[in-house]
Image: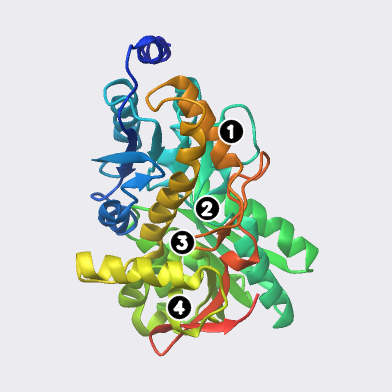
Amino acid sequence: MLFKKAVSTLLLSAACASFAQAEVKVGVITSSTGPIALVGLPQKNSVPLLPARAGDQEVKYIALDDGSDPTATVKALKKLITEDNVDAIIGPSGSPNAMGLIQFVAEAGVPLLAPVGTAAVVLPMNDEKKWVFKTTQNDDLIAKALFEHMAKQGVKTLGFIGTADPYGENWAKVMGGLAAERGIKVVASERFQRQDTSVTGQSLKVLASRPDAVLVAAPGSAAVMPQTTLYDQGYRGQMYQTHGAALPDFLKLGGKKVEGTILAASLMLVLDEVADSHPSKQVARDYVAAYEKLNGSKPATFGANTYDAGLLLQRAIPLAAAKAAPGTPEFRAALRDALEQSHELAATQGVYNMTAEDHSGFDERGRELIQVKNGNWTLLGSN
C-alpha cells in the first residue's frame, strides 16, 4: 500500500510538471548473475543493441541485475518506477521473478515486457496482467508442435519432469490437456527445483514407468540434468525439451547425452536452414551478427527475447508520444495501448500480433521443430 501511494504521488508530480521528460526511459531487469545467469547474461549483453531512438524520441535504458533473486527483482522494479521514473520495463529473466511483479506494474501503470517462459504472466488475462506483454512463445504454441510429432511417431506413454515453479507447472497443465487429446497417457509426472544438484529420485520414478518418450520442462541450464541423469540410468527412449532449452550451453553441457533431443523453438537456432522468405530471418540474422560483434559469442534465444522487447517499444513509442509526453501516466497508458495493437511486427523470434486477449502474439511463424544432431541444432521439419 505504501508503494502504491508513493507511486501515485510521483506520477502525479510528473503529470503536473511544467516541462515534459525529454526522453523515454526504459528499465531493464536481468539475472546476469546467480542460478539463472545463463538466461540473464545474454539479455544483459543485448541491452546495448536495443534501439536508441523510436521515431522522434530518444530512448534511455537503465539496466539492473537482480542476482536471480525474486526479492531483489521487486526492489529493482520499485527503484526504476519511484526513482528513475521509467515509462516501461523489460524483464526480468525468471518466471517466478516476473510473477512477483505483476501487481506492482499494474498499480503503477507501467508496461512490463517480460522475456520469460511461462504463459502465466499473461494468462488468464485480467486487469493486472493487461499491463504485461510477453516476448516468448506461449507454452501451448510450442507444446502443440511437440505433441503433433509424438502422435505421428506413435508415442503412447509419456514421462514428464518439470521445474517446481510457474514454468514447470504451466507446462504440466498444457501437457496434460494435449496428451489427453491425442490418446497419450502420462505415466509419470515429477518436479524438481532449479537449484537442485540431483534429480536421481525423480528420474528413477520416470524410468520405472517405462515411457515411450520423456518431456523435460525447465528453463536454461536446468533443462540438462534431468535428461543426462536419465541417460546415465539407461533410458534410450525419445527425449523432448521445451523452448527453455534453446541455448548453446544445453549442447555444451549435455554433449552426447542430449543427442537426438527434439524441441520446438524459434528459427534463430537454425537460421541457415530456414527459408529466406521467412519474415523474421533477416531480423534474426542482423541481431546475431551485432551480438557476436559486440560480445564475441553467439547469443542464446533468451537475449533475442529482450531485443524483441526493444523492437516492440520502438514501434509503440511514437504512437504513444503522439498522445502524451514521456514521463507521464498518460504516456504510459498510451504506450500500453499501442503495444496491444502491435500488428505483423517481424522480430527475431517470429511475428508479433498482439490483441487485448493475447499479449504474446505469436503464431506458427514463431516456432520450428528442431533436433539435436551431431552436437548441433538441425531443422527437423516445418510446423
Residue receiving disc 2: 168
Disc ID at residue 170: none
- Closest to the observer, 230 or 315: 315
Task: Tell us which disc is closer to us: 3 or 4.
Answer: 4
Circle 1 — which element? helix
The CA distance from mark 1 to mark 3 is 24 Å
Q: Earlier in the sequence, mark 4 or mark 1?
A: 1
Q: Is residue 130 above or below residue 313?
A: above
Task: Tell us which disc is closer to us: 1 or 2.
Answer: 1
Q: Is residue 21 visible?
A: yes
| Residue at image coords 65%, 70% | 145
| Residue at image coords 27%, 22% | 83
Q: Is residue 223 left or right of residue 264?
A: left
Q: Is residue 333 above or below residue 29?
A: above
Q: Is residue 226 visible?
A: no
- Closest to the observer, 108 or 167: 108
Quick one: label 3, few (<14), some, or many (20+) residues within 10 Å?
A: many
Quick one: label 2, few (<14), some, or many (20+) residues within 10 Å?
A: many
The CA distance from mark 4 to mark 1 is 33 Å
| Residue at image coords 25%, 43% | 67
Circle 2 — which element? helix
Q: Earlier in the sequence, mark 1 or mark 2?
A: 1
Which x, y percent locates residue 346?
53, 61
Task: Tell us which disc is closer to us: 2 or 3.
Answer: 3
Callout 4, which amino acid?
Leu
Disc ID at residue 271: 4
Total numbered labels placed on residues in the image: 4
